[in-house]
Image (cartoon, rainbow, N blue to C red):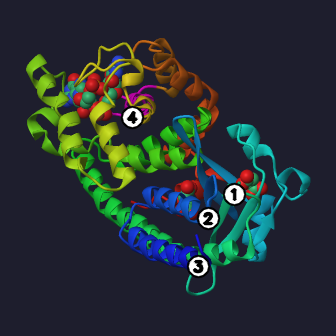
Amino acid sequence: MTRPEELEKRLNMLVKFGGLISTETNLTKLLEVIADQVKLMLNGDRCSVFIVDRQTNELWSKIAQGMQQTEIRVPFGKGIAGLVASTGRAINITDAYGDTRFNHDLDMMTGYHTRTILAVPLKNVGGHIIGVFEVMNKDQGSFGPEDEGILQLMGSLAASAIENAQLYESLSKSQLETIYRLAVTAEYRDQHDTAIHLRHISEYSALIALGMGLPEREVENIRYASPLHDIGKVGIADAILLKPGKLTPDEFEEMKKHTLYGAKILSGAESSLLQIACKVAASHHEKFNGEGYPSRLKGEQIPIHARIVSVADVFDALCMQRVYKPKWDPEKARDYILEEKGKAFDPAVVEAFERTYADITKIYAITDGKTTIIPGITKELHKYNF
Ligand code: C2E
Ligand code: SIN
Ligand code: SIN
Ligand code: FE
């Protein structure tokens, strides 16, 4: 190709790129589209988009590991991406393994072999750095100054699309707040200490997820999605929900429908958080051995988020007073959870529950009104002002 042809081709690709990314509001999908386009444009073999997390002073990125996506995080100032974010300057590396700034860890994780890297900052219209582009292994030789210019251009287009998608994500957080209020209303009928119960479920579930080693993002997802697990109780009549004694078999059949109602209320949501909440509402009464409801799912057929919330929910239901039962001591509730390992509950979730049990009782104690201040945890809890 002659030079003008090459330039024209790139210009066309840039225009197409701008159009493609301006309509995508789902952040995960957007980042995938951007990475694909960058690879194509620069004849690179791989592209990573790192996004700044101001709260932790880190950059995060999704990388593919086999069939799964893993989130990786690097501190500002560390590795190539961290350096570009902290200095705001592009870095062009022609021999990665000969460069002390290059961090091999990611290659080790993915089995990839990085040779050349071009990394540029992603700046928004205000000039603030919101992320970093890294493109790796140019098909021939290494990346040149022209590549750098193009990548900067793509970066400025991408930055505004990314900010837009982040705004959408925060919008769905405010929608989520509305739904929390609905959850409180739903639960208020059978438990007047609803706010406490919802905090418990949220914190216990997050702790167990942490104990299982789930990535931070999943821990946060489960933290916010779990309080919605019983939202379907809005559809259950008072005569059943508030019955002071044991339910008849027919009444219990009706009660079981709260899982289906919940799933229906939360279905079709665009936000990934509500999609998770939907699975949790649908499946939090499934049992690991296949004897739960509504669908008698078994083992890994039950979404992991639901397997976690199920333990948190039963532990807390046992520890709280209900119209139909007195409250149990946490120790007795814990024994019950352990007894049900492999029956109602996923053994791996029960093990994580055991590992985090000390923290779980701390959460229980503060919100039980027995203790008022536990440094660190109370700070965490203040995030949940439903
Ligand atoms: P919930 O009160 O939030 O209880 C959630 C889950 O905790 C229960 O799911 C059960 O797995 C566990 N759980 C609660 N209390 C006990 C208990 O005393 N012993 C044992 N072994 N497990 C307990 P489950 O059974 O599917 O019930 C779902 C919902 O149905 C309950 O939510 C509650 O709202 C209602 N429910 C269940 N049984 C009765 C009852 O006898 N009377 C009334 N009024 N409601 C009931
Ligand atoms: C962020 O939006 O800055 C954090 C997202 C994440 O934890 O992956
Ligand atoms: C880094 O050093 O920024 C991470 C390594 C890589 O992107 O390949
Ligand atoms: Fe439930």
Camera-near label (2 vs 3) is 2
Quick check: can you spot residue 369?
A: no
**Distance from Cα at disc 2 to Cα at disc 4:** 59 Å
The amino acid beneath tag 4 is Met
Specify the quadrant of the image occupied by residue 113. Answer: top right
**Distance from Cα at disc 2 to Cα at disc 3:** 12 Å
SS state under label 1: loop
Q: Quadrant of the N terminus?
A: bottom right
Q: Say the numbered circle drawn on residue 320.
A: 4
- Judging by the rendered image, the residue that carries numbered circle 3 is 153
**Residue 13, image x and y in percent?**
48, 71
Quick check: can you spot residue 103?
A: yes
Give the residue displayed 32% in from the left and 24% down from the top. 286
Give the residue displayed 19% in from the left and 28% down from the top. 256
- Judging by the rendered image, the residue that carries numbered circle 1 is 138
SS state under label 2: helix
SS state under label 4: loop
Q: State yes or no: Cβ of the residue under disc 4 lies below 8 Å from any atom of ligand 1.
A: yes
The part of the chain drawn in magenta is 310-328
Camera-near label (4 vs 1) is 1
The amino acid beneath tag 3 is Leu
The amino acid beneath tag 1 is Lys
